[in-house]
Amino acid sequence: MYFGKYTEDGAAKRPRFGALRSVEMAKLKEEIERFLHSLDVEENVSPNTLRGYRSDLMQLLAFVAERRCREPEAVAAGELDQTIVRGFLVEQLRRASASSAARKLSAVKRLSRYLLREEILSADPTAGVSAPKQDKKLPNHLTVDDIFRLLDTPDTATAAGTRDRAILEVIYSAGLRVSELVGLDWQDLDEELELLRVRGKGRKERIVPVGRAAIDALHAYRDRIGELCPRGRKDDAAIFLNQRGGRLTVRSVARAVDNYTVQCGLAAKISPHALRHSFATHLLGAGADLRAIQELLGHASLSTTQKYTHVNLDQLMETYDKAHPRS
């Protein structure tokens, strides 16, 4: 309980930095919970992002508690310093990949900015702590021929196969993340304009075009939902359902794509995200503008989309060899 200052609605107001024992009173675990709450309420981040931040910061709390030889609940927020952050980063690099360690450091940086803003800390414990260098991996994607083979693999003589064909068509046609796909409702589809309303990361909505082949596959699937869900629907709004009538999960889609990858004889294991990468790669290869692809994919930053420019290096080199007079 804080004393002396209150907000207009009568709630206790946190003392500003410099007030009596403000740093000593603040417990790191409680501040992490307040930070996560602010992400949920103020920034409206997605549930998956929130879970990721919680996992990373609870690992940080456990690390500090172990270093300080006390219970996590007893760790003060003021004990988060540069030595702790550097030690935490080194520990993560021993256990996981550079990209995973960099993600965890990013979570700590955001928490630190929050604690500075709230004046729980007087100095940034992440200042001067750089993220580890990461290997730049090219996005895993399929050729156009391989995509067509994969799309033709589900057995449309069955209701489940008809649904799975629609799933593959929609992911590739609209370049969706799997979480966006399973979150689709029938009201999100405008068949006349051939558009989909998609809820992406951070619960941001965007409108994307969807091809006629995907819409036809959705029609075929919709006609067989009763056969797919003999006991009825538990979710009337959702497009993609399981056989119990509930909304399909991300994990179920991943398993289905994995099975169809094996069935059609693709050499590499393909995730649903590879269909999204293929969507972007094929658009870029056909001359689509990078900014337009950014909008279609729902990337907040163009730098995220620019990785697809590396995928077409062979095509660019071939063009160079044909066109440059000194090649």
Image (cartoon, helix red, strand yellow):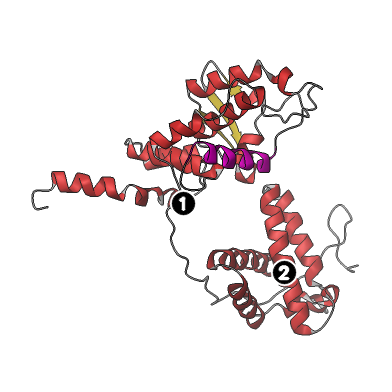
The image shows residue 32 at horizontal and vertical percentages of 76, 65
The image shows residue 274 at horizontal and vertical percentages of 50, 44
Residue with the mark numbered 2: 59
Element assignment for label 2: helix
Q: Residue at x 52, y 73 (%)?
A: 130
Q: Identify which amino acid the numbered label 2 is placed on.
A: Gln
Q: Residue at x 67, y 80 (%)?
A: 84
Circles 1 and 2, Cβ within 8 Å, touching? The answer is no
Taking depth in this image into account, of 7 and 87 the one nearest to the observer is 87
Residue with the mark numbered 1: 304
Say which quarter of the image contains residue 22: bottom right
**Mark 2 residue crowding within 10 angstroms, few (<14) / some (14–19) / many (20+):** some
Taking depth in this image into account, of 86 and 248 the one nearest to the observer is 248
Q: Identify which amino acid the numbered label 1 is placed on.
A: Thr
In-image side of 161 versus 296 (left or right): right
Q: What residue span does the magenta drawing correspond to?
A: 249-265
Say which quarter of the image contains residue 282: top left
